[in-house]
Amino acid sequence: ASSGVINVVTKRPSDTFGASLKASYSDPDNETKLAGYVTGPINNDVRYLVSARTNQRDGFVKNLADGRDLNDRNDWGVRARIDLTAGENLDVSVIADYWKREADCCIWTLRSIGTPASVGELEQIAAGARFDEENDTQNIDGGVFSDVNTGGISVQADYSFGSGYTFTSITAFRSWHTVDGLDTDNRPVNTFNVNFADFKQLCGDLTNAKERRWAMASPSGALIFVQQMLGVPNGWSVA
């Protein structure tokens, strides 16, 4: 990798069958994690690797205003990779992934109150909140959510010439859509429930380069990037 660039190399598909599964569970919030993969050959020229994971947890912040359990976790993702030996000098890799989160997260809790106490702090005291390092309560009426969808696909082709040269072409597209919100006023009445946003992003990249040993020569490419962010009105919720 060049200076300032982090190069992450993920596990490649195997030419022999293999599988792995990991699971964990913890109290008191019923946190459950599962992760696994399957890999192997389709034929002599094609190999695959499919992985998946999920992470779920109950909310651990009790909302005194309506009894909601906030700051839970609920996300899952899948990823697939195909490696193809398309000829004596040509190797192709196709990678696709998708990840989704739907959580009533992430609200803060108060460890202490100001002097003088604010209206919201007085309302929390009246509702039974205790302000210390172990405070796991809130007292709000607005939405608390973080919903994310992201996915992408990439194709890499490596063609080996004579004299040690390799031509590499990488084409990739990725989308990101997040909708999140918090109750900004920190109160059980709607005085400033406006911290909600709908954020969308799409990017694509086409890169070509010629490589000889450790030297990169003749790079070229194109990049597309589209981004949209919208403020969301009071009381808006995600279907």
Image (cartoon, helix red, strand yellow):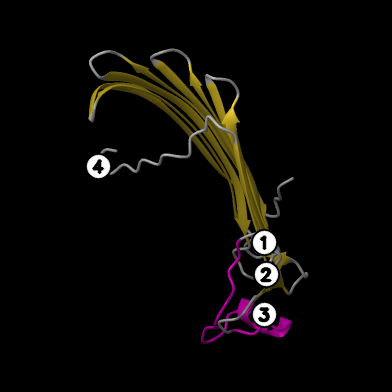
Amino acid at pointer 2 = Phe
- Measure the alpha-carbon separation of dots 2 and 4: 42 Å
Q: Which label lies toward us, 2 or 3?
A: 2
Would you say the residues marked 1 and 4 are in contact, meaning their CB atoms lie under 8 Å apart? no
Report the residue marked by disc 1: 72
Q: Earlier in the sequence, mark 1 or mark 4?
A: 4
Which mark is nearer the camera, 1 or 4? Answer: 4
Residue 124's disc number: 3
The spot of residue 68 in percent (x, y) is: 75, 66
Which structural element holds mark 4? Answer: loop
Q: Secondary structure at mark 3?
A: helix
Quadrant for the C terminus in the image: top right
Q: Residue type at mark 3?
A: Gln
Residue 90 vertical position relative to residue 53 in the rendered view, above or below: above
Residues tagged 2 and 4 counted as in contact (Cβ below 8 A): no
- Magenta-highlighted residues: 106-131
- Local packing at callout 2 (Cα closer than 10 Å; few below 14, some 14-19, many 20+) is some
Q: Residue under label 2, please give it.
A: 60
Q: Give me the residue at 57% from left, 77% from top.
A: 110
Tell me if label 2 and label 1 are in contact, CB under 8 Å. yes
The image position of residue 160, as x and y in percent, is 33, 17
